[in-house]
Image (cartoon, rainbow, N blue to C red):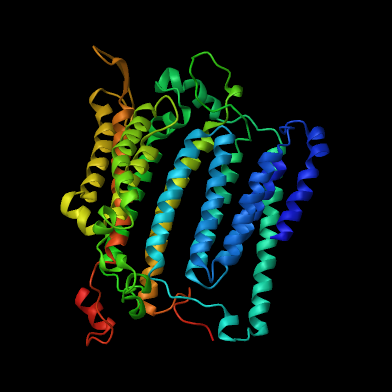
Amino acid sequence: MEAVLALSIGVLFGSGVWLVLRPRTFQVITGLLLLSYAVNLFIFLMGRAKLNQAPITLTENIDPAQFADPLPQALVLTAIVIGFASTALYLVVLLASRGLTGTDHVDGKESA
Amino acid sequence: MILTVSVIAAAATWPRDMSFELGDATNNFDPAFALLWLMGCACAVGAAWQAKYHRLRALALLGGTGVITCITFLALSAPDLALTQLMVETVTAILILLGLRWLPPRRPPQELNLVIPWTVWGRRSRDLAVAFITGLGMAALSYWVMINPAHQSISDFFVLRALSEGGGSNVVNVLLVDFRGFDTMGEICVLTIVSLTVYALLRRFRPAPESIQLPVQQTDSVDPASSQTPHQQASSGYLMIPGVYLRLLSPVIAMIAAYLFMRGHNLPGGGFVAGLTFAIAIILQYMLAGTNWIETRLHLRPHRWLSFGLMIVLATATGAWLFGYPFLTSHTAHLALPVLGEIHVPSAFLFDLGVFAVVVGSTTLILVALAHQSLRSHRQPGSTQTDSQILKELN
Protein backbone atom coordinates (compact mmCIF):
# COMPACT_ATOMS: atom_id res chain seq x y z
CA MET A 1 0.00 0.00 0.00
CA GLU A 2 2.84 2.38 0.88
CA ALA A 3 4.55 1.69 -2.44
CA VAL A 4 1.34 2.31 -4.38
CA LEU A 5 0.80 5.59 -2.56
CA ALA A 6 4.41 6.68 -2.99
CA LEU A 7 4.37 5.95 -6.71
CA SER A 8 1.06 7.72 -7.13
CA ILE A 9 2.37 10.81 -5.38
CA GLY A 10 5.37 10.63 -7.71
CA VAL A 11 3.19 10.38 -10.83
CA LEU A 12 0.88 13.22 -9.73
CA PHE A 13 3.84 15.41 -8.80
CA GLY A 14 5.68 14.64 -12.04
CA SER A 15 2.60 15.39 -14.18
CA GLY A 16 2.09 18.59 -12.22
CA VAL A 17 5.69 19.72 -12.69
CA TRP A 18 5.51 19.00 -16.43
CA LEU A 19 2.34 21.09 -16.73
CA VAL A 20 3.70 23.95 -14.64
CA LEU A 21 6.64 24.16 -17.05
CA ARG A 22 4.29 24.52 -20.07
CA PRO A 23 3.77 27.91 -21.71
CA ARG A 24 -0.07 28.06 -21.70
CA THR A 25 -1.94 29.44 -18.70
CA PHE A 26 -4.56 26.67 -18.66
CA GLN A 27 -1.83 24.05 -18.55
CA VAL A 28 -0.27 25.84 -15.59
CA ILE A 29 -3.55 25.94 -13.63
CA THR A 30 -4.08 22.21 -14.29
CA GLY A 31 -0.52 21.57 -13.17
CA LEU A 32 -1.00 23.54 -9.96
CA LEU A 33 -4.10 21.51 -9.15
CA LEU A 34 -2.20 18.24 -9.69
CA LEU A 35 0.69 19.51 -7.57
CA SER A 36 -1.72 20.40 -4.79
CA TYR A 37 -3.16 16.86 -4.80
CA ALA A 38 0.33 15.40 -4.59
CA VAL A 39 1.48 17.74 -1.84
CA ASN A 40 -1.74 17.30 0.17
CA LEU A 41 -1.37 13.52 0.01
CA PHE A 42 2.28 13.80 0.97
CA ILE A 43 1.58 15.97 4.02
CA PHE A 44 -1.35 13.75 4.97
CA LEU A 45 0.84 10.63 4.82
CA MET A 46 3.35 12.20 7.21
CA GLY A 47 0.89 10.89 9.80
CA ARG A 48 1.36 7.42 8.19
CA ALA A 49 -1.32 5.38 6.46
CA LYS A 50 -3.74 3.86 8.97
CA LEU A 51 -6.90 1.95 8.18
CA ASN A 52 -10.10 2.29 10.22
CA GLN A 53 -8.56 4.54 12.85
CA ALA A 54 -10.29 7.85 12.23
CA PRO A 55 -9.31 10.37 14.94
CA ILE A 56 -12.68 10.44 16.67
CA THR A 57 -12.24 9.92 20.40
CA LEU A 58 -15.60 8.87 21.82
CA THR A 59 -14.39 8.08 25.34
CA GLU A 60 -11.92 9.81 27.61
CA ASN A 61 -9.51 7.01 28.48
CA ILE A 62 -7.81 6.22 25.22
CA ASP A 63 -4.48 5.28 23.79
CA PRO A 64 -3.37 7.89 21.22
CA ALA A 65 -1.60 5.18 19.22
CA GLN A 66 -5.02 3.75 18.34
CA PHE A 67 -5.89 6.78 16.21
CA ALA A 68 -4.64 8.24 12.96
CA ASP A 69 -2.56 11.38 13.41
CA PRO A 70 -5.02 14.31 13.45
CA LEU A 71 -2.45 17.08 13.02
CA PRO A 72 -1.54 16.53 9.33
CA GLN A 73 -5.25 16.04 8.66
CA ALA A 74 -6.11 19.43 10.12
CA LEU A 75 -3.27 21.05 8.16
CA VAL A 76 -4.36 19.40 4.91
CA LEU A 77 -7.98 20.42 5.48
CA THR A 78 -6.81 24.02 5.67
CA ALA A 79 -4.61 23.47 2.62
CA ILE A 80 -7.50 22.11 0.54
CA VAL A 81 -9.63 25.20 1.20
CA ILE A 82 -6.74 27.61 0.62
CA GLY A 83 -5.93 25.65 -2.54
CA PHE A 84 -9.41 26.39 -3.83
CA ALA A 85 -8.98 30.09 -3.08
CA SER A 86 -5.63 30.29 -4.84
CA THR A 87 -7.03 28.41 -7.86
CA ALA A 88 -9.84 30.96 -8.07
CA LEU A 89 -7.40 33.85 -7.85
CA TYR A 90 -5.11 32.33 -10.45
CA LEU A 91 -8.04 31.69 -12.79
CA VAL A 92 -9.12 35.32 -12.62
CA VAL A 93 -5.57 36.59 -13.14
CA LEU A 94 -5.34 34.21 -16.10
CA LEU A 95 -8.55 35.57 -17.61
CA ALA A 96 -7.52 39.17 -17.03
CA SER A 97 -4.13 38.55 -18.61
CA ARG A 98 -5.81 36.90 -21.58
CA GLY A 99 -8.14 39.91 -21.98
CA LEU A 100 -5.36 42.50 -21.70
CA THR A 101 -2.70 40.82 -23.81
CA GLY A 102 -4.84 38.85 -26.25
CA THR A 103 -2.93 35.64 -25.71
CA ASP A 104 -2.95 32.79 -23.22
CA HIS A 105 0.83 32.55 -23.13
CA VAL A 106 2.32 32.92 -19.66
CA ASP A 107 4.68 35.66 -20.88
CA GLY A 108 1.80 37.75 -22.22
CA LYS A 109 3.14 37.46 -25.76
CA GLU A 110 3.57 34.62 -28.21
CA SER A 111 7.18 33.52 -28.29
CA ALA A 112 8.82 33.48 -31.68
CA MET B 1 0.31 6.22 -20.08
CA ILE B 2 1.50 2.74 -21.02
CA LEU B 3 4.72 3.53 -19.18
CA THR B 4 2.80 4.47 -16.04
CA VAL B 5 0.70 1.33 -16.25
CA SER B 6 3.76 -0.86 -16.54
CA VAL B 7 5.60 0.97 -13.76
CA ILE B 8 2.66 0.54 -11.41
CA ALA B 9 2.15 -3.08 -12.41
CA ALA B 10 5.80 -3.69 -11.61
CA ALA B 11 5.42 -1.89 -8.31
CA ALA B 12 2.36 -3.93 -7.44
CA THR B 13 4.38 -7.12 -7.41
CA TRP B 14 7.47 -5.59 -5.83
CA PRO B 15 6.62 -4.36 -2.30
CA ARG B 16 5.50 -7.72 -0.82
CA ASP B 17 8.90 -8.95 0.20
CA MET B 18 10.16 -5.42 0.89
CA SER B 19 7.66 -4.47 3.55
CA PHE B 20 8.00 -7.69 5.53
CA GLU B 21 11.56 -6.82 6.37
CA LEU B 22 10.77 -3.23 7.24
CA GLY B 23 8.09 -4.08 9.72
CA ASP B 24 6.30 -0.83 10.42
CA ALA B 25 4.64 -0.59 7.02
CA THR B 26 1.12 -1.97 6.73
CA ASN B 27 1.90 -5.30 5.15
CA ASN B 28 -1.34 -5.68 3.30
CA PHE B 29 -1.14 -5.16 -0.40
CA ASP B 30 -4.63 -4.38 -1.60
CA PRO B 31 -5.22 -4.99 -5.33
CA ALA B 32 -8.34 -2.79 -5.27
CA PHE B 33 -6.31 0.08 -3.87
CA ALA B 34 -3.59 -0.42 -6.49
CA LEU B 35 -6.23 -0.46 -9.24
CA LEU B 36 -7.76 2.69 -7.82
CA TRP B 37 -4.46 4.52 -8.01
CA LEU B 38 -3.74 3.05 -11.42
CA MET B 39 -6.83 4.96 -12.53
CA GLY B 40 -5.79 8.00 -10.53
CA CYS B 41 -2.36 8.11 -12.16
CA ALA B 42 -3.84 7.46 -15.61
CA CYS B 43 -6.17 10.44 -15.04
CA ALA B 44 -3.27 12.66 -13.93
CA VAL B 45 -1.06 11.73 -16.87
CA GLY B 46 -4.05 12.04 -19.20
CA ALA B 47 -4.78 15.52 -17.86
CA ALA B 48 -1.14 16.50 -18.38
CA TRP B 49 -1.33 15.22 -21.94
CA GLN B 50 -4.69 16.78 -22.88
CA ALA B 51 -4.43 20.15 -21.14
CA LYS B 52 -3.17 22.00 -24.19
CA TYR B 53 -5.73 21.15 -26.88
CA HIS B 54 -8.66 19.60 -25.00
CA ARG B 55 -9.29 21.67 -21.89
CA LEU B 56 -12.65 20.13 -21.03
CA ARG B 57 -11.18 16.64 -21.27
CA ALA B 58 -8.26 17.65 -19.05
CA LEU B 59 -10.69 19.11 -16.51
CA ALA B 60 -12.72 15.88 -16.43
CA LEU B 61 -9.56 13.81 -15.96
CA LEU B 62 -8.42 16.15 -13.22
CA GLY B 63 -11.74 15.55 -11.48
CA GLY B 64 -11.03 11.82 -11.69
CA THR B 65 -7.73 12.25 -9.86
CA GLY B 66 -9.48 14.44 -7.30
CA VAL B 67 -12.17 11.86 -6.59
CA ILE B 68 -9.55 9.14 -6.17
CA THR B 69 -7.60 11.37 -3.77
CA CYS B 70 -10.86 11.79 -1.89
CA ILE B 71 -11.45 8.01 -1.73
CA THR B 72 -7.89 7.60 -0.44
CA PHE B 73 -8.53 10.08 2.37
CA LEU B 74 -11.67 8.15 3.25
CA ALA B 75 -9.88 4.79 3.20
CA LEU B 76 -6.97 6.04 5.29
CA SER B 77 -9.02 7.26 8.26
CA ALA B 78 -9.57 10.89 7.29
CA PRO B 79 -13.35 11.29 6.78
CA ASP B 80 -13.20 15.07 7.29
CA LEU B 81 -10.64 15.47 4.53
CA ALA B 82 -12.64 13.24 2.18
CA LEU B 83 -15.78 15.35 2.67
CA THR B 84 -13.95 18.63 2.16
CA GLN B 85 -12.01 17.34 -0.84
CA LEU B 86 -15.22 16.16 -2.52
CA MET B 87 -16.93 19.52 -2.06
CA VAL B 88 -13.88 21.53 -3.12
CA GLU B 89 -13.58 19.28 -6.16
CA THR B 90 -17.13 20.14 -7.20
CA VAL B 91 -16.66 23.86 -6.66
CA THR B 92 -13.30 23.92 -8.49
CA ALA B 93 -14.80 22.12 -11.48
CA ILE B 94 -17.63 24.69 -11.72
CA LEU B 95 -15.12 27.51 -11.25
CA ILE B 96 -12.88 26.41 -14.11
CA LEU B 97 -15.84 25.60 -16.36
CA LEU B 98 -17.00 29.20 -15.91
CA GLY B 99 -13.58 30.41 -16.99
CA LEU B 100 -13.19 28.13 -20.04
CA ARG B 101 -15.34 30.32 -22.26
CA TRP B 102 -12.89 33.22 -22.14
CA LEU B 103 -9.89 31.21 -23.28
CA PRO B 104 -8.86 31.13 -26.93
CA PRO B 105 -9.54 28.01 -28.99
CA ARG B 106 -6.38 26.06 -29.62
CA ARG B 107 -6.01 23.64 -32.49
CA PRO B 108 -3.43 20.89 -32.74
CA PRO B 109 -0.51 21.62 -35.14
CA GLN B 110 -1.44 18.58 -37.26
CA GLU B 111 -4.69 20.33 -38.24
CA LEU B 112 -2.86 23.50 -39.14
CA ASN B 113 -0.06 21.66 -40.98
CA LEU B 114 2.60 23.28 -38.81
CA VAL B 115 6.01 21.78 -38.39
CA ILE B 116 7.25 21.91 -34.80
CA PRO B 117 10.87 23.13 -34.77
CA TRP B 118 13.48 21.00 -33.05
CA THR B 119 14.13 23.68 -30.39
CA VAL B 120 10.59 23.12 -29.15
CA TRP B 121 11.19 19.37 -28.99
CA GLY B 122 14.40 20.05 -27.12
CA ARG B 123 12.59 22.19 -24.57
CA ARG B 124 9.87 19.60 -24.19
CA SER B 125 12.26 16.75 -23.57
CA ARG B 126 14.16 18.86 -21.06
CA ASP B 127 10.89 19.59 -19.21
CA LEU B 128 9.89 15.95 -19.41
CA ALA B 129 13.22 14.95 -17.87
CA VAL B 130 12.78 17.50 -15.07
CA ALA B 131 9.23 16.29 -14.43
CA PHE B 132 10.34 12.65 -14.43
CA ILE B 133 13.20 13.27 -12.01
CA THR B 134 11.13 15.36 -9.58
CA GLY B 135 8.34 12.77 -9.70
CA LEU B 136 10.77 9.99 -8.98
CA GLY B 137 12.37 11.98 -6.17
CA MET B 138 8.99 12.71 -4.62
CA ALA B 139 7.99 9.04 -4.83
CA ALA B 140 11.26 7.94 -3.23
CA LEU B 141 10.94 10.55 -0.49
CA SER B 142 7.36 9.60 0.37
CA TYR B 143 8.18 5.88 0.35
CA TRP B 144 11.18 6.45 2.58
CA VAL B 145 9.10 8.47 5.03
CA MET B 146 6.24 5.97 5.09
CA ILE B 147 8.32 2.87 5.75
CA ASN B 148 10.06 4.51 8.70
CA PRO B 149 8.20 4.53 12.00
CA ALA B 150 6.64 7.81 13.07
CA HIS B 151 8.53 9.68 15.75
CA GLN B 152 7.04 11.01 18.93
CA SER B 153 5.00 14.01 17.82
CA ILE B 154 2.81 16.62 19.45
CA SER B 155 -0.30 14.91 18.05
CA ASP B 156 -0.82 12.75 21.14
CA PHE B 157 -1.42 15.93 23.09
CA PHE B 158 -4.34 16.82 20.82
CA VAL B 159 -5.81 13.31 20.75
CA LEU B 160 -5.73 13.06 24.55
CA ARG B 161 -7.12 16.50 25.22
CA ALA B 162 -9.71 16.89 22.44
CA LEU B 163 -12.57 15.46 24.46
CA SER B 164 -11.52 16.40 27.97
CA GLU B 165 -10.42 19.98 27.27
CA GLY B 166 -11.79 20.84 23.82
CA GLY B 167 -15.14 19.23 24.50
CA GLY B 168 -15.49 17.49 21.13
CA SER B 169 -14.69 13.99 19.98
CA ASN B 170 -13.77 14.84 16.36
CA VAL B 171 -10.12 15.69 16.97
CA VAL B 172 -9.61 17.26 13.52
CA ASN B 173 -12.49 19.66 14.02
CA VAL B 174 -11.44 20.49 17.59
CA LEU B 175 -7.95 21.20 16.24
CA LEU B 176 -9.37 23.59 13.66
CA VAL B 177 -11.81 25.52 15.82
CA ASP B 178 -10.05 25.33 19.17
CA PHE B 179 -6.37 24.29 19.45
CA ARG B 180 -5.42 25.92 16.17
CA GLY B 181 -8.22 28.47 16.09
CA PHE B 182 -5.85 31.32 15.35
CA ASP B 183 -4.67 29.53 12.22
CA THR B 184 -8.26 29.02 11.06
CA MET B 185 -9.00 32.66 11.73
CA GLY B 186 -6.09 33.63 9.49
CA GLU B 187 -7.33 31.22 6.89
CA ILE B 188 -10.80 32.67 6.66
CA CYS B 189 -9.23 36.14 6.39
CA VAL B 190 -7.25 34.82 3.41
CA LEU B 191 -10.46 33.43 1.89
CA THR B 192 -12.19 36.80 2.34
CA ILE B 193 -9.28 38.71 0.83
CA VAL B 194 -9.09 36.33 -2.14
CA SER B 195 -12.79 36.53 -2.87
CA LEU B 196 -12.79 40.33 -2.66
CA THR B 197 -9.72 40.47 -4.93
CA VAL B 198 -11.44 38.20 -7.44
CA TYR B 199 -14.51 40.40 -7.29
CA ALA B 200 -12.47 43.58 -7.76
CA LEU B 201 -10.43 42.13 -10.64
CA LEU B 202 -13.59 40.97 -12.40
CA ARG B 203 -15.29 44.35 -12.13
CA ARG B 204 -12.77 45.72 -14.60
CA PHE B 205 -12.48 42.53 -16.57
CA ARG B 206 -12.30 42.97 -20.33
CA PRO B 207 -12.27 39.75 -22.34
CA ALA B 208 -10.34 39.30 -25.56
CA PRO B 209 -12.27 40.72 -28.55
CA GLU B 210 -12.95 37.37 -30.18
CA SER B 211 -14.63 35.86 -27.13
CA ILE B 212 -17.17 38.68 -26.63
CA GLN B 213 -19.66 37.28 -29.14
CA LEU B 214 -22.02 34.55 -27.97
CA PRO B 215 -20.50 31.10 -28.38
CA VAL B 216 -21.60 29.05 -31.43
CA GLN B 217 -23.58 26.65 -29.25
CA GLN B 218 -25.86 29.47 -28.11
CA THR B 219 -26.58 30.92 -31.56
CA ASP B 220 -27.67 27.74 -33.37
CA SER B 221 -30.88 28.63 -35.28
CA VAL B 222 -32.12 25.01 -35.37
CA ASP B 223 -31.82 24.40 -31.65
CA PRO B 224 -34.93 25.80 -29.87
CA ALA B 225 -32.91 26.12 -26.66
CA SER B 226 -30.81 28.93 -28.17
CA SER B 227 -33.83 31.25 -28.26
CA GLN B 228 -34.93 30.47 -24.69
CA THR B 229 -33.75 32.05 -21.49
CA PRO B 230 -32.17 29.64 -18.98
CA HIS B 231 -35.31 29.90 -16.86
CA GLN B 232 -37.54 28.88 -19.79
CA GLN B 233 -35.24 25.96 -20.48
CA ALA B 234 -35.53 24.86 -16.87
CA SER B 235 -39.30 25.19 -16.57
CA SER B 236 -40.49 24.02 -19.99
CA GLY B 237 -37.51 23.27 -22.16
CA TYR B 238 -34.99 20.46 -22.32
CA LEU B 239 -33.85 21.02 -18.74
CA MET B 240 -37.29 20.40 -17.27
CA ILE B 241 -36.37 17.18 -15.48
CA PRO B 242 -33.25 18.59 -13.77
CA GLY B 243 -35.35 21.73 -13.21
CA VAL B 244 -37.90 19.91 -11.07
CA TYR B 245 -35.33 17.62 -9.51
CA LEU B 246 -32.76 20.23 -8.48
CA ARG B 247 -35.37 22.58 -7.05
CA LEU B 248 -36.77 19.81 -4.90
CA LEU B 249 -33.26 18.84 -3.92
CA SER B 250 -32.07 22.27 -2.79
CA PRO B 251 -33.77 22.28 0.65
CA VAL B 252 -32.43 18.75 1.14
CA ILE B 253 -28.89 19.92 0.37
CA ALA B 254 -29.34 22.84 2.75
CA MET B 255 -30.48 20.43 5.44
CA ILE B 256 -27.46 18.19 4.84
CA ALA B 257 -25.30 21.28 5.23
CA ALA B 258 -26.99 22.03 8.56
CA TYR B 259 -26.54 18.40 9.62
CA LEU B 260 -22.84 18.40 8.73
CA PHE B 261 -22.45 21.64 10.62
CA MET B 262 -24.22 20.46 13.78
CA ARG B 263 -22.34 17.16 14.08
CA GLY B 264 -18.97 18.70 13.19
CA HIS B 265 -17.62 18.96 16.72
CA ASN B 266 -18.11 15.28 17.51
CA LEU B 267 -18.30 13.44 14.19
CA PRO B 268 -17.00 14.14 10.66
CA GLY B 269 -18.35 17.44 9.37
CA GLY B 270 -17.79 21.06 10.37
CA GLY B 271 -18.01 24.62 9.19
CA PHE B 272 -15.87 24.28 6.08
CA VAL B 273 -17.67 21.34 4.54
CA ALA B 274 -21.10 22.64 5.58
CA GLY B 275 -20.33 26.02 4.01
CA LEU B 276 -19.20 24.43 0.77
CA THR B 277 -22.29 22.18 0.67
CA PHE B 278 -24.57 25.16 1.20
CA ALA B 279 -22.75 27.18 -1.46
CA ILE B 280 -23.19 24.29 -3.90
CA ALA B 281 -26.95 24.31 -3.23
CA ILE B 282 -27.03 27.98 -4.25
CA ILE B 283 -24.73 27.53 -7.25
CA LEU B 284 -26.89 24.66 -8.55
CA GLN B 285 -29.88 27.00 -8.65
CA TYR B 286 -27.80 29.56 -10.52
CA MET B 287 -26.68 26.95 -13.02
CA LEU B 288 -30.23 25.81 -13.53
CA ALA B 289 -32.28 28.96 -13.94
CA GLY B 290 -29.68 31.53 -14.93
CA THR B 291 -28.27 34.49 -13.06
CA ASN B 292 -31.02 36.99 -13.94
CA TRP B 293 -33.92 34.85 -12.81
CA ILE B 294 -32.27 33.92 -9.52
CA GLU B 295 -31.19 37.43 -8.69
CA THR B 296 -34.64 38.92 -9.14
CA ARG B 297 -35.92 36.42 -6.57
CA LEU B 298 -33.06 35.85 -4.16
CA HIS B 299 -30.93 38.58 -2.66
CA LEU B 300 -27.80 36.81 -1.66
CA ARG B 301 -25.36 39.61 -0.75
CA PRO B 302 -22.20 37.51 -0.31
CA HIS B 303 -20.34 40.57 1.02
CA ARG B 304 -22.58 40.57 4.05
CA TRP B 305 -22.04 36.85 4.61
CA LEU B 306 -18.30 37.57 4.59
CA SER B 307 -18.49 40.45 7.03
CA PHE B 308 -20.92 38.71 9.39
CA GLY B 309 -18.74 35.63 9.36
CA LEU B 310 -15.61 37.58 10.24
CA MET B 311 -17.45 39.52 12.93
CA ILE B 312 -18.83 36.36 14.54
CA VAL B 313 -15.36 34.82 14.61
CA LEU B 314 -13.83 37.95 16.09
CA ALA B 315 -16.60 38.25 18.67
CA THR B 316 -16.19 34.61 19.75
CA ALA B 317 -12.44 35.02 19.94
CA THR B 318 -12.50 38.23 22.00
CA GLY B 319 -15.52 37.08 24.02
CA ALA B 320 -13.17 34.89 26.05
CA TRP B 321 -11.56 38.07 27.44
CA LEU B 322 -14.81 39.03 29.15
CA PHE B 323 -14.56 35.88 31.25
CA GLY B 324 -10.91 36.46 32.01
CA TYR B 325 -9.57 33.80 29.65
CA PRO B 326 -7.01 34.24 26.85
CA PHE B 327 -8.02 35.08 23.25
CA LEU B 328 -9.91 32.25 21.48
CA THR B 329 -10.58 30.15 24.59
CA SER B 330 -13.63 27.98 24.05
CA HIS B 331 -16.21 26.59 26.42
CA THR B 332 -18.62 23.70 26.06
CA ALA B 333 -22.10 23.69 27.51
CA HIS B 334 -24.67 20.91 27.45
CA LEU B 335 -28.19 22.23 27.35
CA ALA B 336 -31.17 20.07 28.23
CA LEU B 337 -34.11 21.05 26.05
CA PRO B 338 -37.64 19.65 26.53
CA VAL B 339 -38.15 18.06 23.10
CA LEU B 340 -34.69 17.74 21.60
CA GLY B 341 -33.09 16.29 24.70
CA GLU B 342 -29.56 17.15 25.63
CA ILE B 343 -27.68 19.15 23.03
CA HIS B 344 -24.04 19.90 22.76
CA VAL B 345 -23.31 23.64 22.53
CA PRO B 346 -19.63 24.54 22.56
CA SER B 347 -18.65 28.17 22.02
CA ALA B 348 -16.57 26.74 19.19
CA PHE B 349 -19.94 26.34 17.47
CA LEU B 350 -20.15 30.09 17.08
CA PHE B 351 -16.61 30.16 15.76
CA ASP B 352 -17.54 27.44 13.27
CA LEU B 353 -20.65 29.42 12.32
CA GLY B 354 -18.38 32.30 11.36
CA VAL B 355 -16.23 29.92 9.31
CA PHE B 356 -19.41 28.62 7.65
CA ALA B 357 -20.60 32.12 6.74
CA VAL B 358 -17.22 33.12 5.33
CA VAL B 359 -16.97 29.96 3.23
CA VAL B 360 -20.51 30.41 1.85
CA GLY B 361 -19.88 34.09 1.18
CA SER B 362 -16.53 33.70 -0.52
CA THR B 363 -17.51 30.69 -2.66
CA THR B 364 -20.70 32.31 -3.93
CA LEU B 365 -18.97 35.68 -4.39
CA ILE B 366 -16.24 34.15 -6.55
CA LEU B 367 -18.52 31.93 -8.64
CA VAL B 368 -21.29 34.48 -9.10
CA ALA B 369 -18.80 37.22 -10.06
CA LEU B 370 -17.39 34.91 -12.74
CA ALA B 371 -20.85 33.89 -13.92
CA HIS B 372 -21.81 37.56 -14.30
CA GLN B 373 -19.13 38.08 -16.93
CA SER B 374 -21.27 36.25 -19.51
CA LEU B 375 -24.13 38.68 -18.92
CA ARG B 376 -22.27 41.96 -18.90
CA SER B 377 -22.10 43.95 -22.09
CA HIS B 378 -18.41 44.16 -22.67
CA ARG B 379 -16.76 47.03 -24.48
CA GLN B 380 -16.67 46.07 -28.12
CA PRO B 381 -13.33 46.10 -29.89
CA GLY B 382 -12.64 49.08 -32.12
CA SER B 383 -14.09 51.62 -29.69
CA THR B 384 -12.14 54.86 -29.55
CA GLN B 385 -10.83 54.44 -26.00
CA THR B 386 -7.50 52.73 -25.73
CA ASP B 387 -6.40 50.64 -22.80
CA SER B 388 -4.01 53.31 -21.55
CA GLN B 389 -6.78 55.92 -21.53
CA ILE B 390 -8.99 53.64 -19.49
CA LEU B 391 -6.15 52.97 -17.08
CA LYS B 392 -5.63 56.71 -16.73
CA GLU B 393 -9.30 57.22 -15.90
CA LEU B 394 -9.13 54.50 -13.31
CA ASN B 395 -6.20 56.13 -11.60
Instruction: Answer with the quarter of the image where residue B202 lies.
Output: bottom left
Question: x, y percentage for residue B352?
Answer: 33, 34
Would residue B335 be found to the left or right of residue B142 on screen? left
Question: x, y percentage for residue B54?
Answer: 52, 68
On the rendered image, what quadrant is the C terminus of chain B found in? bottom left
Question: x, y percentage for residue B19?
Answer: 78, 36
- Given residues A22 and B49, the one toward you in this image is B49
Would residue A97 be found to the left or right of residue B114 on screen? left
- Given residues B276 and B180, the one toward you in this image is B276
Task: State the residue at coordinates (58%, 40%).
Answer: B72
Q: Residue B362: in sight, yes or no?
A: no
Task: State the residue at coordinates (72%, 60%).
Answer: B2
- Given residues B125 and B235, the one toward you in this image is B235
Q: Residue B304: in sight, yes or no?
A: yes
Instruction: Answer with the quarter of the image where residue B201 lies.
Output: bottom left
Q: Is residue B80 above or below residue B119?
A: above
- Given residues B286 and A107, the one toward you in this image is B286
Q: Is residue B264 above or below residue B208?
A: above
Question: x, y percentage for residue B288?
Answer: 30, 53
On the rendered image, what quadrant is the N terminus of chain B found in? bottom right
Q: Is residue B240 above or below residue B26?
A: below
Counting labels gives: 0
Task: State the residue at coordinates (52%, 27%).
Answer: A55
Q: Is residue B384 above or below residue B189?
A: below
Would residue A12 be found to the left or right of residue B278 on screen? right
